[in-house]
Image (cartoon, rainbow, N blue to C red):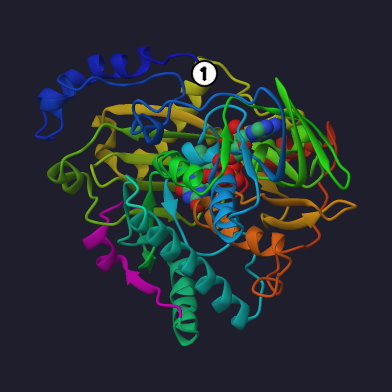
Amino acid sequence: MASQQSTPLMRLMTGSARLAATTWPVAGRIFRERLEIDDNRSLWVSKTPGYRPRPALQGRITADLAIIGGGFTGTSTAYYVSQRFPNRRVVLLEAATLANGASGRNGGMMLNWVNGCDNVTPSMTARIYQMTRNGIANLCALIERHALPVDYRRDGTVTLYTDPARAEAAHAEVELHNTLGIPTRFFDGAELRQHLAVEHGCGAVFDPDTGQINGAQLVRSLAPVLEAQGVQIYEGTPVLRVQEGTRIRLTTAQGEVDAGAIVLATNGYTGALGYFRDALFPLHSHVFATAALSPEEQHTLGWRGLAGFADDFDRISYASMTRDGHLIFGGGSNRAYSYCFNNRTTYPGGAMSASRHQRAMEATLRRYFPQSHMLPIAHRWVGTLGITFDRRPLIGVRGEQRNVYYAVGYCGHGVTLANLAGEILCDLYAGDDSRWRDLPFIQSGYHRIPPEPFRWIGYQMFTRLTGRSPRV
Ligand SMILES: Cc1cc2nc3c(=O)[nH]c(=O)nc-3n(C[C@H](O)[C@H](O)[C@H](O)COP(=O)(O)OP(=O)(O)OC[C@H]3O[C@@H](n4cnc5c(N)ncnc54)[C@H](O)[C@@H]3O)c2cc1C
C-alpha cells in the first residue's frame, strides 16, 4: 500500500481553524507530533525498532517438524513442541518476517470465547470460556517467565450494546453465565459511562481478565527463546510447494525441507498452499491508530480505563487503547474489509482505495466519540484474516499419513486462540488429544464455501444487499 501522507496533513491543515477554537488538549501537540503514516506498517511493528530478520533457508535440511508461518500459531507451536520434545528438530519457515501476518497487524484485543461456538450446551459454554481464560493467563505467564519486552494490559474489555432490547438480553445472558462460574458483569448505561463515555451505549458486558497485547513484540521477542530451545527459524522463506508422504517435502524459494510432519500455521494464507480452499477465505481488514494520547486527552475523549470495546453490530466496530495512549480502531462498515478474489492475500487496492476505507472507519469512530475528528492518526494498516463460513476455527491433523497439523480460521478472534493453538497442536503431535477432543472445533468438519466466481458473487450480494459484513 502506498504512502498516505496527504490525508492526515490535509486534515491537519483544514482542522487547524477548528483547533484554535477548542480546548481539546491534543491540539497543542499536533504540530509537534511527527505523523508516522508509512507503508502499511502497523503500530505494533513500529514498536519493534531495529528488528533484524533471520536469513532465509538455503539448501536442503531435514526436520522432525516443520512449521509453516511465523505468527502466533507458528511460534506458539514451536514453543510448546520444542519444550516437550527437546531432542526433535523443529524448523519454522516464515515467508516474510515474523509477525508479517495478522499477528502483527491486528486490533490487539486479547479476548475470551471462540467464534462460531454460540449454540453449545451450558457446560460447553463454561468450558470454552475457561479454556480461553486459561489461554490468556498462560500467555501472560509465558511473557513474565521469559521477561519478554511485550506491552500488554489485562484490565478488561466490554461488548457494547447499542439497542435497549439487545442490552437487556445481554444482561440476562450474564446472569446465566454467572451461574456457570463465568465472571462477566453487566454495566447499565450509567455504569458504562464511568468507564467509556460513548454515544449510543445502552449497556455493556464487562469481561474482566481480557485485555490488549502487542502481537509483533510477542512474536518477535519469543524468537530468541525458541532458538534457545533448539528451533531453527528461517525468515524470507516462502514455502512454495508441499509434497505429502511418510516424509513431507517442502520446496522453498532457495531450499528444501524434508520433514516428518508439518504444521500449517498460515491462517488466511493457507489456500495458497493448496489446503482448505473450500473452507477458508482471506479477507483484508483495515485498522488505524492515533498518536499517543495523554491520560487527560483519553479522559476528554471519553476513554476511562478499559483495554478495549467491541460493539453488537454485524459490521462490528472494535477499539482498544495501548498503555501509552494509542487508540486503535477497526471495523464498523463494509468498507473496513476488502475481499480477496481467489485466495489473493496481497492487498488488492491502492492508496486511494485504502484511504476511502479509512475515511469510512473514521466516520464510524466519530459516531462513538464525536471529538475524535481532532485526533491525529499516526498509523494505518491492512491485515489478512482467515474466515470460515460459520466463523468456527479448524484445528486438527490431516493427510493420508496423519502428519499435516493445522490451526486456521480464527475469524478475527485469534489473539488468544492462535496462541493457545500451540498447546493444542503440541498435544495432537504427541498423540494425545484427550484435553481437547470434546471441543467443537477440534478435528471437526466444516461448511464448504463455493469456488470462485460464485464465492465472490455471494460475498458481494451478501454485503451489498444486506449492508452487513461478516461479523469477524
Ligand atoms: C486487521 C485485523 C485485526 C484483528 N484484530 C483482532 C483482535 O483485536 N483480536 C483478536 O483476537 N484477533 C484479531 N485478529 C485476528 C488475529 O490477529 C489472527 O487470528 C491471528 O493473528 C492469526 O495468527 P496466525 O499465526 O494463525 O496467522 P498469521 O499471523 O496471519 O501468520 C501467518 C504467517 O504465515 C506466513 N506465511 C503465509 N504463507 C506462507 C508460506 N507459503 N510459507 C511461509 N510462510 C507463510 C505469513 O507471512 C504470516 O506471517 C485481527 C486480524 C486482523 C487482520
Q: Is residue 36 above or below residue 313?
A: above
**Residue 331 in view (yes/no):** no
175 lies left or right of 471 = left
Q: Is residue 338 inside the magenta stretch?
A: no
Residue at mark 1: 1
- Amino acid carrying label 1: it is Met
Give the image quadrant in which the ligand numbered 1 is located: top right
41 lies left or right of 322 = right
Q: Is residue 187 inside the magenta stretch?
A: yes
Mark 1 Cβ and ligand 1 under 8 Å apart: no
Work out whether residue 159 or residue 237 is closer to the camera in this orientation and state it.
237
Residue 115 sits in quarter = bottom right
The image position of residue 369, as x and y in percent, is: 29, 43
Work out whether residue 428 or residue 101 is closer to the camera in this orientation and state it.
428
The image position of residue 209, as x and y in percent, is: 37, 66
462 lies left or right of 33 = right
- Residue name at image x 29 percent, y 15 percent: 9
- Residue name at image x 52 percent, y 18 percent: 1
**Residue 78 in view (yes/no):** yes
Work out whether residue 150 or residue 453 is closer to the camera in this orientation and state it.
150
Q: What range is drawn magenta here? A: 182-200
Give the structural element (helix, strand or loop) at label 1: loop
Pick out the residue farthest to the front: 87
- Residue name at image x 74 percent, y 66 percent: 431
Within 10 angstroms of label 1, few (less than 14), some, or many (20 or more) residues?
some
- Residue name at image x 53 percent, y 54 percent: 419
Q: Is residue 317 above or below residue 241?
A: below
Q: Is residue 187 above or below residue 239?
A: below
Q: Is residue 5 above or below residue 409?
A: above
The image position of residue 351, as x and y in percent, is: 50, 16
